[in-house]
Amino acid sequence: MNKSILLVDDKPEIAKIITLYLSGYNVKYVENPIIALNWLKEGNMPDAIISDLMMPEMNGEEFVTALKENENLSHIPILILTSVESDSDRTRLFEKGANDFILKPFNPEELKTRIKVLLK
């Protein structure tokens, strides 16, 4: 059975590209963290989460915090996609529980490799 990935990004065009790159996985796309949290609370359990950082309504940092504070969801590895290159932002997100980062624009082979490593 293929591993499943929850992809959270407010830009559908980015999600389409990522879904194509990760064609060997079952990718569930949602456009914001609030929808993602509701989907997860319904009992859906992906093997990993890829989330954008800069989103309206709830940003990626708030999403990571909500996931890690939930006992049923805290074990899910999270990869953050971001165009923000700030060391302090990355450090803060690692402290909150993010497992990895990829800077936009990203190399598709790097994304595939990082997901593979994250899912081991």
Image: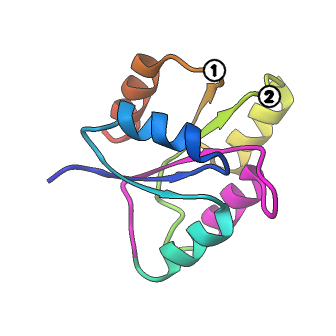
Is 10 drawn above or below residue 81 in the view shown? Answer: below
Q: Is residue 93 visible?
A: yes
* Residue found farthest to the bottom: 42
The residue at the point 24 percent across, 38 percent down is 24
- Residue at screen point 36% across, 54% down: 47
Image vertical order of residue 80 relative to residue 29, above or below: above
The amino acid sitting under disc 2 is Val
User: Which part of the image, by quadrant, shows the C terminus?
Assistant: top left
Q: Is residue 54 magenta?
A: yes
Q: Position of residue 96 (x, y in %)?
A: 71, 50
From the viewer's side, name the closer residue of 17 and 78.
Answer: 17
Q: Residue furthest front?
A: 13
| Residue visible at 62% across and 62% down in the picture | 68
Using the image, tell me which numbered label, if any, was put on residue 105: 1
> Left or right: 106 with respect to 116?
right
Magenta residues span: 44-69
Q: Please give left or right for residue 41 compared with residue 114 in the image.
A: right
- Is residue 46 covered in magenta? yes
- The structure residue drawn at horizontal position 65% and vertical position 24%, both measured from the top left corner, is 103
x%, y% of residue 73?
51, 68
Residue 61 position (above or below residue 22):
below
Which mark lies nearer to you, 2 or 1?
A: 1
Residue bearing mark 2:
84
Q: Residues within 10 Å of mark 2 (few under 14, many from 20)?
A: few
Q: Pick whichever, 77 or 103, lies toward us.
A: 103
13 shown above or below 107 = below
Mark 1 residue type: Pro
